[in-house]
Image (tube, rainbow, N blue to C red):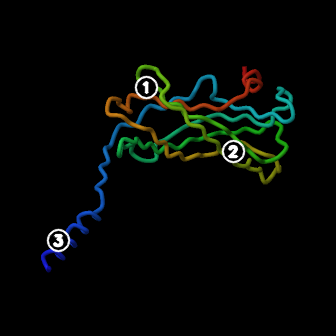
Amino acid sequence: MKNNFFFLIFFVLIGCSPKTIIEEKISCPNVLFSDEHDYFVEASETTDINNISYIAEINNFSFNSDCFITDNMAYIDLSLLFIVNPINVANSNIFLPFYIAIIDKKNELKDIQYYNISGNFKIDNETNLYVESELRKKIKFRLLHDDTRDISADVLVVGFMLSKNQLEILN
């Protein structure tokens, strides 16, 4: 009876042991800003050059930590910096929709993920006017990984989501 009880406890302990997670460090992919979608324009009422509220640009990026793969999922911690310039601002609210596309070494689109960032303009205390403001967004980018693909050879392309009218104003 004691042997049966011992084996029962032994199997329960083995069955409940934590799964060891293996993390493999990888080189982080290159990051590029889209040439056609690197500026964002917000216009009040109609999308017209005379009604522009603010113009934003994707300014910089950094990796917050090492890139790694766990259980066929690649993890990339990316931080983006946006610079927003007020033109004819009616209120302090800022809203910037953007995307991150992943392009493999064959120049094929593998994935696209959509994000947004919200914030407010800073106000100059002396003039009481809105001034150039910075917004930062930290993204934990995840990408399904198969063993046949080298993620470090991929490219992350960051750009703003723009309407047809916004593109016309920017061009």
Please give the residue where the numbered disc 1 appears in the rendered image: 104
N-terminal-most mark, 3 or 1: 3
Judging by the rendered image, the residue that carries numbered circle 3 is: 7
Residue located 71% across and 42% down the image: 95
Can you tell which of label 3 and label 2 is closer to the viewer?
Answer: 3
Task: Give the residue at x 73% y 38%.
Answer: 85
* Residue 165, picture quadrant: top right
Chain-order first, disc 3 or disc 2:
3
What amino acid is found at the position of numbered circle 3 in the picture? Phe
The numbered dot on residue 92 is none
Q: Seen in the image, is 144 located left or right of residue 81?
A: left
Q: Position of residue 35 (x, y in %)?
A: 60, 23
- Where residue 10 appears, x then y in whole percent? 19, 70
Residue that carries the numbered disc 2 in the rendered image? 133
Mark 2 is surrounded, within 10 Å at the Cα level, by few (under 14), some (14 to 19) or many (20 or more) other residues, namely some
Give 1 or 105, whichever is nearer the viewer: 1
Residue lying at 42% horizontally and 33% vertically, measured from the top left: 29
For the residues labelled 3 and 2, say whether their Cβ atoms are less than 8 Å apart: no
- Secondary structure, mark 1, is loop
Q: CA distance from mark 1 to mark 2?
A: 34 Å
Tell which circle, 1 or 2, labels the residue nearer the N-terminal end: 1
Mark 3: give few (<14), some (14-19) or many (20+) Cα within 10 Å. few
User: On the rendered structure, is 158 left or right of 160?
Assistant: left
Amino acid type indicated by mark 2:
Ser
Amino acid type, mark 1:
Asp
Q: CA distance from mark 3 to mark 1?
A: 51 Å
Q: Nearer the viewer, residue 104 or 60?
A: 104
Q: Nearer the viewer, mark 1 or mark 2?
A: 1
Q: Position of residue 131 (x, y in %)?
A: 75, 44
> Secondary structure beneath disc 2?
strand
**Tag in front: 3 or 1:** 3
SS state under label 3: helix
